[in-house]
Image (tube, helix red, strand yellow):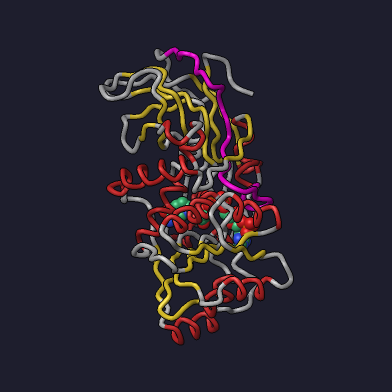
């Protein structure tokens, strides 16, 4: 369902989730369409991104106090792709398709900071939230942080069938490396091998998961690109190659407060780290904008040659956003998840109104 031309809907935090996130932790508010001031433009969102990191942002006590808590009533932040429907900005015209931090809402005003033009070389505009957006860029930045991948090196990737992991496979193969994924289920294994550039995949739900993993890593992993954290690290570190690098991208398995089964895996991890001189490093794509042009050029070539996966799962309707976010943790699908909140052609907006909450 979309709102009529005069109103704008947005998804806000209703209360901080306790444990597993529920759609009822969010609510939808309706207001009027905001007006862009001089130097700003108005975007009508078409696709809104669903990112697991949001679970951390809406927590009552994110990272145990390491991040500020988001106040109840805040519009959920995040990337979106939309069409400019009114502009008082010299560099952005009505009709342009742009990607930016426009949030879980139908309309957003922007001054252009952090906004990227949608690259038509990547296919449909939804790809600007997947392979061409934060997940693809994160994969690229992570491999850059690892110092680049040399031909013949093996990169092991957890959460491989997710949006970031899907992109890692293509970039590793393009560098002559070998990509080994960890994913849940036969469908994801097929997707990773047939579409996403992976050479081998271990099924984390299979009873012989550790045997599969060991078999896929005859010479160990030179890099472990970790998207999930949690107890899996203890399984993986002993399978690292000498001098290997553990690259922490995200902690998907820990965002809901579920930090394992209570067993302390740290001693096994540290024994392997010590024994093999393994390095552990974290990275973030934030602040790495200087890498964007090289990322976009390499990606366009890989997309044109079919050398990288760009699968996007689309759900329909602003109301689906909370369900789609909860689904990332409960029953994830291969590739990037986005929600379509407006049809292909955005109707011109009445830019004379201001946004007011109806509640
Ligand atoms: N460092 C940065 O700058 C940066 C930027 C963007 C994202 N990230 C992080 O990167 C990670 C991946 O993001 P994404 O967008 O690719 O997420 P995504 O599309 O939701 O995929 C995550 C994958 O993790 C796996 N998974 C979920 N729960 C798990 C668990 N408890 N144990 C093991 N695997 C689990 C799922 O695959 P299976 O069920 O198939 O295993 C899923 O496909 C997240 O941690 C995110 O926060 C970091």
**Whether residue 19 is visible:** no
**Whether residue 111 is visible:** yes
Q: Quadrant of the C terminus?
A: top right
Name the dominant secondary structure of the magenta segment. loop
Whether 293 is drawn above or below 284: the answer is above
Depth check: give the residue in front, 141 or 325: 141
Q: Quadrant of the N terminus?
A: top right
Residue sitting at x 33%, y 20%? 93
Whether 179 is drawn above or below 288: the answer is below
Q: Residue 356: where, in percent of width, then height?
A: 47, 23
On whether residue 174 falls in the magenta region, the answer is: no
Report the residue that reaches farthest toward the right. 207
Left or right, 229 with reference to 83? right
Q: Residue 15: where, in percent of width, then height?
A: 58, 44
Depth check: give the residue in front, 89 or 308: 308
Q: How many marks?
A: 0
Stretch in magenta = 327-350
> In which image quadrant can residue 205 be found?
bottom right
Residue sitting at x 65%, y 57%? 189
Residue sitting at x 65%, y 74%? 210
Give the image quadrant in which the ligand numbered 1 is located.
bottom right
Left or right, 151 with reference to 19? left
> In which image quadrant can residue 114 be found?
top left
Whether 325 is drawn above or below 168: the answer is above
Q: Residue 194: where, in percent of width, then height?
A: 61, 51
Depth check: give the residue in front, 116 or 303: 303
Depth check: give the residue in front, 259 or 28: 259
Q: Residue 71: where, in percent of width, then height?
A: 48, 44
């Amino acid at each position: 369902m979309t709102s009529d031309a005069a109103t704008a809907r947005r998804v806000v935090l209703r209360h901080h989730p306790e444990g597993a996130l529920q759609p009822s932790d969010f609510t939808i508010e309706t207001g009027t369409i905001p007006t862009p001031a001089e130097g700003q433009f108005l975007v009508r969102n078409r696709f809104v991104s669903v990112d697991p990191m949001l679970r951390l942002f809406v927590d009552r006590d994110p990272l145990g106090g390491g991040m500020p808590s988001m106040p109840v009533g805040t519009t959920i932040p995040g990337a979106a792709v939309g069409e400019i429907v009114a502009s008082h900005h010299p560099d952005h015209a009505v009709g342009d398709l742009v990607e930016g931090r426009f949030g879980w809402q139908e309309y957003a005003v922007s001054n252009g900071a952090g906004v990227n033009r949608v690259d038509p070389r990547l296919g449909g505009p939804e790809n600007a939230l997947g392979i061409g957006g934060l997940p693809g860029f994160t994969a690229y930045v992570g491999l850059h942080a690892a110092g680049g991948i040399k031909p013949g090196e093996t990169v092991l990737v957890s959460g491989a069938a997710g949006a970031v992991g899907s992109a890692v496979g293509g970039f590793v193969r393009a560098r002559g490396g070998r990509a080994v994924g960890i994913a849940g289920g036969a469908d994801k294994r097929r997707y990773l091998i047939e579409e996403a550039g992976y050479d081998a995949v271990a099924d984390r739900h299979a009873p012989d998961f550790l045997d599969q993993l060991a078999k896929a890593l005859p010479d160990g992993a030179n890099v472990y690109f970790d998207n999930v954290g949690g107890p899996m690290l203890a399984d993986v570190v002993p399978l690292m190659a000498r001098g290997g690098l553990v690259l922490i991208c995200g902690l998907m398995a820990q965002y809901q407060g579920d930090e394992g089964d209570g067993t302390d895996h740290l001693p096994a991890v540290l024994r392997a780290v010590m024994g093999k001189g393994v390095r552990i490093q974290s990275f973030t794509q934030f602040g790495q904008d200087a890498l964007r042009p090289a990322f976009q050029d390499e990606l366009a070539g890989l997309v044109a040659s079919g050398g990288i996966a760009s699968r996007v799962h689309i759900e329909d309707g602003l109301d689906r956003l909370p369900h789609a976010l909860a689904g990332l943790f409960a029953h994830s699908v291969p590739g990037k998840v986005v929600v379509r909140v407006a049809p292909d052609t955005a109707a011109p907006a009445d830019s004379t109104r201001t946004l007011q909450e109806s509640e």
